[in-house]
Amino acid sequence: MQKTLFEIQKMDCPSEENLIRMKLDGISEIKYLDFDIPNRMLAVFHNGKNDQIEKSIIELNLGGKKISTQHTDQTDFDESTNQKKLLWSVLAINFLFFLIEMTTGLISKSMGLVADSLDMLADSFVYGISLFAVGGTLIKKKRIAKLAGYFQIALAIVGFAEVLRRFFGTEKLPDFSTMIIVSIFALAANGICLYILQKSKSKDEAHMKASMIFTSNDVIINLGVITAGVLVNWLNSNKPDLIIGTIVFVLVIQGAFRILKLGK
């Protein structure tokens, strides 16, 4: 058996892990995938050549590159038996906060919260595709990925249109306190999701968990919305909220195109 090590520069959280798992699903030579999210590394245990594996990883545009390939005698892999349960847990958390942030974003007139809710929904799509396509055909999985990707793009486009309307209009200032409070809870939720998905894999203590949390794009987005809320209050302007909303909508669309690539 061969062990090929890949560096995945843009693998920031378990959402990217699931994208990679789905992309590599169906390659019969692969026996096991060992993800190291904090160090952005992936070890692929496989038989035969790794050309198709490398090609599939590169196609995701996550900055993947092969580091090394070597022979290994390892055949016993500690695959978690409760992986589905963990995925259901993070799916539920992400979808719950999609509903919370979308609702509070509309009520408080914050595009930052609305955009972050779509980012939560995007993660829910990834976890959902992984769950609902388990045991199904490759065609079924690709069809679900396409629907999720196009739906996500449509929502982001509507968001962009609303940002432009508010930028040139006379909309009331968003409620900065709601932005900050809800984003703090979303920040905690993202940390919990990362911990849930990694607790069965990582043997290291607090420093490793902190590394996993603070390298996550989702956490950076939450901090961005919190900062925007502070600036809205300080500058008495809705522009910081619109700027962070635009940035997150761009990230949502990028994620949607990654999902669409799984449908090809």
Image (cartoon, rainbow, N blue to C red):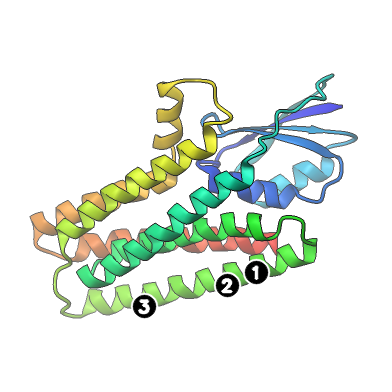
Q: Quadrant of the N terminus?
A: top right
Report helix, strand or loop for mark 3: helix
Q: Quadrant of the C terminus?
A: bottom right
For residue 146, the mark is 1
Query: Which residue is under mark 3?
Result: 161
State the residue in front, 83 or 141: 83
Residue contact between numbered discs 3 and 2, judged by CB atoms under 8 Å: no
Rate crowding at label 2 as few (under 14), some (14 to 19) or many (20 or more) other CA atoms within 10 Å.
some
Q: Position of residue 173 (x, y in %)?
A: 14, 69
Q: Residue at x 28, y 67 (%)?
A: 105
Q: Residue at x 50, y 41 (%)?
A: 12
State the residue in front, 228 or 186: 186
With 143 as the anchor, is 209 left or right in this view? Answer: left
Name the amino acid type tagged 2: Tyr
Q: CA distance from mark 1 to mark 3?
A: 23 Å
Query: Which residue is under mark 2?
Result: 150
User: Can residue 16 be seen in this snapshot?
Assistant: no
35 lies above or below 71: below
Name the amino acid type tagged 1: Lys
Residue contact between numbered discs 2 and 1, judged by CB atoms under 8 Å: yes
Picture quadrant where residue 102 is located: bottom left
Q: Position of residue 152 (x, y in %)?
A: 51, 69
